[in-house]
Amino acid sequence: MQKIIISGCCGHMGRVVADICANDSDVEVAAGIDLLPQPMEGFPVFSTPAACNVEADAVVDFSHPAALGPLLDFCVGRRLPVVLATTGYSEEQLAQIGQAAKSVPIFRSANMSLGINVLADLIRRAASLLGEDFDVEIEERHHRRKLDAPSGTALMLADAAAGALPYEAEYVYDRHSVRKPRDRREIGISSLRGGTIVGDHTVVFAGRDEVIELTHRAASREVFAAGAVKAAKFLAGTEKPGLYDMSHLIAMEKEI
């Protein structure tokens, strides 16, 4: 049985991860870490990574970008693989992640859902085939409490399209102050915040007299937590340091 530590265990996503592990005979929560610790059933909770002295096979992080530094120090020091399911990292933090990945396996994805990663693959194919003849626009919708905009997933989907287009795309986040026709090389990204929307993403390919829309809707946060637990299982059996993402997990499942 593989043992994991949940960083951000007292938050909503951390609790969902704990529930999934409680119903999975192959994995056990060894401990939790949370800046505002609360009693959790079945495992101890520590207020900082440094205070956690429990043995484990991997860490799953659903906390906050501000918690990254101490968490990476903890994982590198303990040689613990870590799944980073948090979004909103700065460029400096992404560089820190890259540096830490030289010492331990790190799994990072802007979205842990298998479906959204399949969508990204479809977008790459569509952008490659449609090329300059179709404009690309992305709309994302999330609950009113989400802090970052656009979502990390929207940027991941934009990167998927941009990497397959025959030109260098420019991301445009706000059009209200610019009075000019849309540039052919733009990828527009729009954000909506409201209610309890878990996460909706739509990529629009708009051409002459025809429109193609690719949409993913998450009905619950459980899809993200389930993906993170799968990633933790994958990392627990990975000894080679480096950066891993959902494509590695999907490739492994295809081989099984």
Image (cartoon, helix red, strand yellow):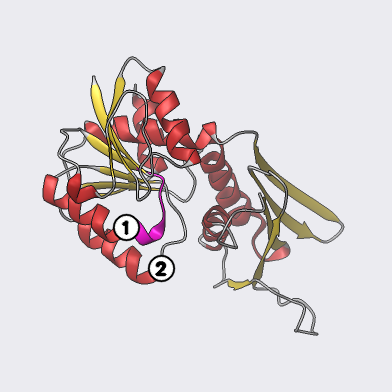
Q: Is residue 100 above or below residue 19?
A: below
Where is mark 2, residue-wise?
A: 90
Q: Position of residue 163 (x, y in %)?
A: 50, 61
Is residue 65 something one can see in this rendering?
yes
Residue 233 colored in magenta in the image = no
Q: Position of residue 44 (x, y in %)?
A: 27, 32
Residue that extends furthest to the right in the rendered view of this protein = 209
Choose top left, top right, bottom left or bottom right for residue 24: top left
Q: Are marks 1 and 2 in contact (CB under 8 Å)?
A: no
Residue hosting label 1: 68
Magenta segment boundaries in residue numbering: 61-67
Q: Amino acid at mark 2?
A: Ser
Q: Earlier in the sequence, mark 1 or mark 2?
A: 1
Query: Which amino acid type corresponds to the residue marked 1 in the rendered image?
Result: Leu
Residue pictured at 57% horizontal, 66% vertical: 166
In the image, taking residue 31 as reference, residue 9 lies left or right, namely right
Q: Secondary structure at mark 1?
A: helix
Residue 107 percent across, percent down from the top left: 33, 45
Question: Observer-nearest residue: 31 or 116?
Answer: 31
Classify residue 157 as left or right of residue 201.
left
